[in-house]
């Protein structure tokens, strides 16, 4: 057995048997900022509602203090964690993570790790302004060091640790030296990318939509986007995992949006200029993900981007008068069969002087058959929905 991977739960159970069980946390209240594993901290008090400055400060300190940054890797670390739990009975920890985490849930957390790192950096910057940090003394100074260490751990070591945890969840045994660890990001066979004009298209991202009728669109103003209106994903698998336990109808499906490299650069500039938090879309545009196999090319949609939201030409020309003037005709689903027609519409919309998004472009839409509800369903739901109880 590799010394790198170790199951801390039996040791914890022996220690608990000696002095009593201090764990009273519940999975529905798990602090999403902590790493996947058997141990986790919770946020029992409400994580919403108005707070004055003093209450907000105390709440943020509590959020940081309740984190499990790393899972224990030896007996001493288990004992240290138990001592911390018993020292703070007002904090609520649990050790039943193995009963709730699934491989898809761990992979979903890893896909969203940028969200955790962003929070850690902002929290560290906040606490660096505390007087105790400047003097190198007090809990605030220690919190800042732990937050910086957490980001470093995510960047440098966590991926390998989570691959070992995936092996444990799938096999229910520790990996031996010759065992091959599962990948956090499953490899998919890359399809030959489509071409638009003289440019090879790239994947801007995957999304899940719940359309009404025959209309197909990637814009939330025309169809329902799941789990939230502006959610993007780096792979079809990640999109399915995000919606595994949502209550959705059979029409829901995964789509992919393809753009040219020039459009990708222009869209990335528009996202940054809008100053909105869209880390997955920006990451996809900077390093386009693979195109999963099995998708059907549905057609081209004329899309506008403005202040973090996608719009479609149908919002700005609902009667179709402008299309009639251009002599182009979309299909019943609202998509264009000829990319040249879509590009003409985008050029016309970009020429309008007022009431328009920052950028219009023609993107190709691909879709995958089969309802989203047939995706693997982890017990208790995908991790961000389990947090809502």
Image (cartoon, grey):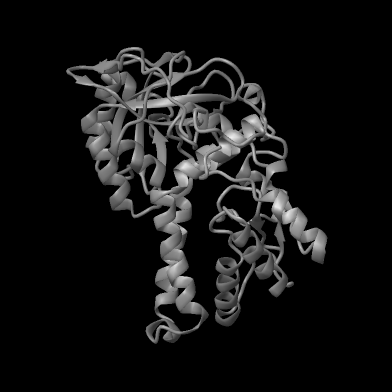
| In the displayed structure image, the side of residue 260 where residue 119 appears, left or right | right
Residue 105 position (above or below residue 69) = above
Q: Residue at x 41, y 42 (%)?
A: 280
Residue 31 position (above or below residue 80) = above
Q: Residue at x 43, y 70 (%)?
A: 145
Q: Residue 4: image x %, image y %?
A: 51, 45
**Quadrant position of residue 312:** top left
Give 38 or 362, whichever is nearer the viewer. 38
Q: Residue at x 50, y 17 (%)?
A: 368
Residue 145 position (above or below residue 272) = below
Q: Residue 2: image x %, image y %?
A: 52, 39
**Quadrant position of residue 366:** top left
| In the displayed structure image, the side of residue 351 where residue 118 appears, left or right | right
Residue 291 position (above or below residue 8) = above
Give 318 or 118, whichever is nearer the viewer. 118
Q: Residue at x 64, y 26 (%)?
A: 376
| In the displayed structure image, the side of residue 92 where residue 304 appears, left or right | left
């Amino acid at each position: 057995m590799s010394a790198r991977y170790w199951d801390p739960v039996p040791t914890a159970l022996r220690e608990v048997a000696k002095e009593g069980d201090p764990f009273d946390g519940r999975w529905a209240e798990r602090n999403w900022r902590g790493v996947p594993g058997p141990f986790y901290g919770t946020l029992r008090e409400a994580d919403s509602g108005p707070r004055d400055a003093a209450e907000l400060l105390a709440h943020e300190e509590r959020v940081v203090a309740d984190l499990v940054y790393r899972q224990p890797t030896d007996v001493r670390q288990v004992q240290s964690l138990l001592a911390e739990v018993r020292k703070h009975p007002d904090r609520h920890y649990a050790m039943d993570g193995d009963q709730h985490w699934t491989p898809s849930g761990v992979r979903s957390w890893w896909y969203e790790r940028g969200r955790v790192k962003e929070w850690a950096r902002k929290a560290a910057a906040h606490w660096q302004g505390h007087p105790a940090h400047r003097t190198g003394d007090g809990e605030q100074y220690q919190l800042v060091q732990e937050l910086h260490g957490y980001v470093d751990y995510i960047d440098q070591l966590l991926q390998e640790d989570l691959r070992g945890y995936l092996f444990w969840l799938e096999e229910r045994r520790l990996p031996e030296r010759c065992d091959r660890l599962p990948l956090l990001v499953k490899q998919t066979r890359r399809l030959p990318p489509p071409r638009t004009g003289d440019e090879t298209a790239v994947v801007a991202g995957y999304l899940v939509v719940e359309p009404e009728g025959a209309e197909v669109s990637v814009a939330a103003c025309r169809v329902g986007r799941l789990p939230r209106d502006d959610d993007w994903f780096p792979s079809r698998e990640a999109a399915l995992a995000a919606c595994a336990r949502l209550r959705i109808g059979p029409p829901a499906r995964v789509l992919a949006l393809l753009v040219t490299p020039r459009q990708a650069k222009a869209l990335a500039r528009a996202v940054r200029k809008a100053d909105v938090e869209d880390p997955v879309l920006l990451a996809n545009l900077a390093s386009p993900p693979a195109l999963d196999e099995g998708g059907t090319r549905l057609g081209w949609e004329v899309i506008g981007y403005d202040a973090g939201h996608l719009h479609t030409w149908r919002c700005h020309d609902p009667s179709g008068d402008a299309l009639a003037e251009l002599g182009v005709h979309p299909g019943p689903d609202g998509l264009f069969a000829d990319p040249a027609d879509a590009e003409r519409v985008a050029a016309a919309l970009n020429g309008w002087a007022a009431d328009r998004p920052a950028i219009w472009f023609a993107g190709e839409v691909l879709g995958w058959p089969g309802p989203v509800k047939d995706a693997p369903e982890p017990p208790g739901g995908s991790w961000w929905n389990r947090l809502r109880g």
